[in-house]
Image: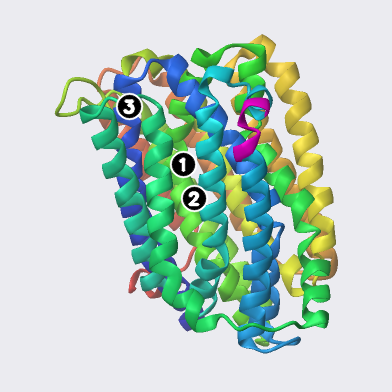
């Protein structure tokens, strides 16, 4: 079992190093944006990209999940058919939708809450959505075949091109917020070009009616669940735009981006986790293995939460080489929302962890109910809390929504694929986390040596978890040996 955990850790690390390096480069755009764009301009960008996230589900129509399911088992069709059918499905669907967006950009600008004079942003959106969708199945192929190095390299190149494009177009060519979209287009096109060898080598002109039927039957339930999931992630931007203004959205988005460190950890775990549990589901000790992974994940994510919560002000106000700060001074008013975002991502990681049972037992039909409930709660609470608490209301709502998703998927997954988790250890981790946060916020304004106090609290959290043997040394050494 420890070898299996080590294998998961190794894949997570490979995905993670590239993801961290790539996303760190991408994160460098935050000081660029927040020190150059006023919050109102950055708010427009955040709002449009929120719609891109939601529309992406309509472009991919759940076929990425369908590919993972049937290409991993080959229960219907051969390997090339299982690649070609979902790839072509996404390609033609995306082509039609992109043309509609592009040709009627003026009409859609009102839907996107963008001034009609900026309808060019909608045209850019159409192109971004198309090329990003085309890359979905080839990337899924690399993950399924456990080729994390190639996957990571292409992802890294995508982000590097995007970052360089932003710097050149914003700093030197003075393209304003359009630079954000143009750079994204260039990066997406190059990515598809780099994936062409994967596409060509796995493409086969064929028609398997049974495979198409099974793909759609499995994948289509992911559309409402995918929409709901993205609503939970980004709908607060359009609602903030409607209830407040672009400036508030910009401040919220900049501070939401500071949650990137927890999001990175969850993302790199997710990349490795899905192929891992599908490939190990038939092992006799699979459930015991998955339970141990959950405990390790919660401990690691909680420690990341502690570190970031303690030092987030130091990170945001860090002076950078050129004039400005890591987060522009105009955006500091939203720093209090960051711990809420971090904890929300932690619960999203638990949701990802619990998804194993849903996939193994083919109970994806419940996903729309789970994520749909969270989406409804998200929308309702955003409208209730934002008028009263502003961006803090949006942050609280995000946390409530992800917690709802974690609880919902836990109930369903345990019903059909019961796993005996180590509840006492997980509860103890959360109690230690809460205690550390309470000690920090209750004394931070009266402590003279605040930096030292933060370090002591971080060490205090680790000591508690090790003293009470939340994770055994043998397992820790095996995981860390990668």
Q: Between label 3 and label 1, give the one nearer the viewer.
A: 3
Q: In x, y percent, where is residue 193? A: 40, 64
Query: Are the two marked residues, 1 and 2, in contact with CB atoms closer than 8 angstroms?
Result: yes
Q: Earlier in the sequence, mark 3 or mark 2?
A: 3
What residue would you read off at disc 2?
301
Q: Between label 3 and label 2, give the one nearer the viewer.
A: 3
C-alpha distance separating marks 3 and 2: 39 Å
Does any portion of residue 426 appear in the rendered image? yes
Q: Earlier in the sequence, mark 3 or mark 1?
A: 3
What residue would you read off at disc 3?
175
> Within 10 angstroms of label 3, few (less than 14), some, or many (20 or more) residues?
some
| Quadrant of res 86 | bottom right
| Segment tinted magenta in the rendering | 102-107
C-alpha distance separating marks 3 and 1: 37 Å
Residue 217 part of the magenta-drawn span: no
Q: In x, y percent, where is residue 164? A: 26, 43
In the depicted structure, whether residue 147 falls above or below residue 181: below
Circle 1 — which element? helix
Viewed as shown, does residue 290 lie left or right of 336? right
> Within 10 angstroms of label 1, few (less than 14), some, or many (20 or more) residues?
many
Query: Are the two marked residues, 3 and 2, in contact with CB atoms closer than 8 angstroms?
Result: no
Query: Of 146 and 51, which appears nearest the observer?
Result: 51
What residue would you read off at disc 1?
305
Circle 3 — which element? loop
Viewed as shown, does residue 363 lie left or right of 183? right
The numbered disc on residue 10 is none
User: Which residue of the protein is positioned furthest toward the front in this rendering?
Assistant: 103
| Quadrant of res 74 | bottom right
Viewed as shown, does residue 303 lie left or right of 25? right
Q: Residue at x 71, y 60 (%)?
A: 62
Viewed as shown, does residue 341 lie left or right of 215? left
C-alpha distance separating marks 1 and 2: 6 Å
């Amino acid at each position: 079992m420890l070898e299996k955990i080590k294998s998961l850790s190794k894949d997570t690390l490979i995905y993670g190093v590239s993801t961290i390096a790539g996303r760190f480069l991408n994160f460098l755009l935050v000081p660029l944006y927040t020190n150059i764009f006023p919050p109102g301009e950055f708010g427009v960008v955040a709002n449009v990209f929120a719609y891109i996230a939601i529309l992406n589900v309509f472009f991919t129509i759940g076929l990425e999940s369908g590919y993972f399911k049937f290409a991993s088992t080959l229960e219907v069709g051969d390997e090339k058919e299982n690649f070609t059918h979902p790839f072509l499905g996404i390609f033609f669907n995306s082509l039609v939708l992109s043309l509609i967006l592009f040709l009627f950009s003026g009409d859609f600008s009102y839907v996107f809450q963008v001034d009609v004079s900026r309808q060019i942003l909608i045209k850019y959106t159409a192109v971004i959505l198309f090329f990003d969708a085309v890359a979905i199945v080839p990337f899924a192929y690399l993950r399924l075949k456990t080729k994390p190095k190639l996957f990571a390299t292409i992802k890294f190149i995508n982000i590097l091109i995007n970052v360089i494009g932003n710097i050149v177009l914003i700093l030197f060519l003075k393209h304003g917020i359009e630079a954000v979209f143009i750079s994204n287009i260039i990066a997406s096109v190059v990515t598809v070009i780099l994936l062409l060898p994967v596409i060509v080598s796995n493409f086969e002109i064929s028609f398997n009616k049974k495979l198409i039927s099974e793909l759609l039957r499995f994948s289509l339930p992911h559309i409402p669940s995918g929409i709901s999931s993205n609503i939970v992630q980004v709908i607060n931007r359009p609602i903030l735009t409607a209830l407040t203004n672009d400036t508030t959205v910009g401040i919220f988005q900049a501070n939401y981006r500071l949650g990137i460190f927890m999001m990175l950890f969850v993302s790199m775990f997710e990349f490795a986790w899905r192929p891992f549990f599908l490939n190990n589901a038939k092992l006799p000790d699979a459930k015991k293995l998955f339970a141990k992974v959950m405990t390790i994940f919660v401990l690691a994510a909680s420690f990341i939460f502690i570190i970031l919560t303690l030092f987030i002000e130091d990170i945001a106000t860090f002076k950078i080489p050129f004039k400005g700060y890591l987060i522009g001074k105009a955006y500091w008013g939203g720093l209090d929302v960051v711990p809420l975002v971090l904890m929300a991502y932690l619960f999203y990681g638990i949701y990802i962890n619990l998804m194993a049972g849903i996939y193994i037992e083919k109970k994806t039909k419940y996903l729309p109910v789970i994520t749909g409930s969270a989406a409804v709660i998200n929308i309702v609470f955003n409208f209730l809390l934002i008028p009263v608490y502003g961006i803090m209301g949006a942050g609280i709502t995000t946390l409530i929504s992800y917690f709802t998703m974690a609880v919902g998927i836990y109930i369903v997954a345990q019903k059909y694929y019961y796993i005996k988790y180590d509840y006492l250890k997980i509860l103890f981790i959360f109690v230690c986390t809460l205690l550390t946060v309470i000690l920090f916020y209750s004394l931070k304004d009266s402590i003279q040596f605040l930096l030292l106090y933060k370090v002591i609290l971080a060490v205090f959290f680790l000591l508690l978890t090790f003293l009470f043997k939340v994770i055994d040394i043998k397992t820790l050494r095996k995981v860390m040996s990668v």
